[in-house]
Image (cartoon, rainbow, N blue to C red):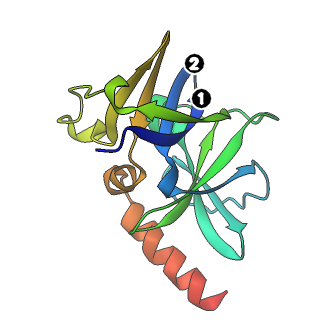
Amino acid sequence: MIENNKAVVFRVGNEEYATPIPFVISIEKMEGITPIPHLPSYVRGIVKVRGELIPVVDFEEILYSRTLPDSDSARMIVLQTDELSFAMLVNEAKEILDIPADCLKQPGLIAYQKTNYFTGVANIESRLITIIDPAKLVESLEGIREIKEYMKTQHTTA
């Protein structure tokens, strides 16, 4: 196991979360989102990033069933998984952090199907940072397959 794991730390609600750097393509300002009707409530719409149309997922909606408020600090963390590229909308992208392996604990919530994308909790000084696996997040989202198919059709026609 690697001694340190680099991750992007971000805030949703009052909590801190992180996602491993290998999944992260970029961090963008929250702008240019085109709403698409009839998509699940957690999908804000689509956005064009580096010439590619990708869905924007409101992480506050997924976690807390409330829409992330628009703010200057809100960011889209653009993520790439084998399944899909997507932007995760968060309150604030805080930092890139080295998370020592000995600070990572398994939360025991992984067995719970709805939160199997929580892969660990980093206990660093006085902070608890929940680690999120974007690939497992995509798999767990209701309706994501249809969105994937829609994005493929947009990709070929765009």
Q: Is residue 34 left or right of residue 123?
A: right
Q: Are marks 2 and 1 in contact (CB under 8 Å)?
A: yes
Q: Is residue 57 left or right of residue 117?
A: right
User: In the rendered structure, which amino acid carries the disc numbered 1?
Assistant: Arg
- Classify residue 139 by image quadrant: bottom left
Residue ID at (30%, 37%): 115
Quarter in which the N terminus is drawn: top left
> Residue reaching furthest front?
3
Residue ID at (48%, 28%): 64
Residue 108 at least partly seen: yes
Q: Position of residue 119 (x, y in %)?
A: 31, 38
The answer to which of 27 and 32 lies nearer the viewer is: 27
Q: Is residue 147 positioned above or below 72 on the image?
A: below
Give SS at disc 2: loop
Q: Position of residue 16 (x, y in %)?
A: 53, 25
Residue 68 at least partly seen: no
The answer to which of 71 and 73 lies nearer the viewer is: 73
Mark carried by residue 14: 2
Give the Cα distance between marks 2 and 1: 7 Å
> Residue reaching furthest bottom?
157
The answer to which of 41 and 10 lies nearer the viewer is: 10
Residue ID at (27%, 41%): 116
Give SS at disc 1: strand
Mark carried by residue 71: none
Q: Position of residue 136 (x, y in %)?
A: 33, 51
Q: Position of residue 83 (x, y in %)?
A: 39, 68
The residue at which mark 1 appears reads as 11
Q: Is residue 40 positioned above or below 123 on the image?
A: below
Q: Is residue 136 left or right of residue 56?
A: left
Crowding near the residue tagged with mark 1, few <14, some 14–19, many ≥20 C-alpha atoms within 10 Å: many
User: In the rendered structure, which amino acid carries the disc numbered 2?
Assistant: Asn
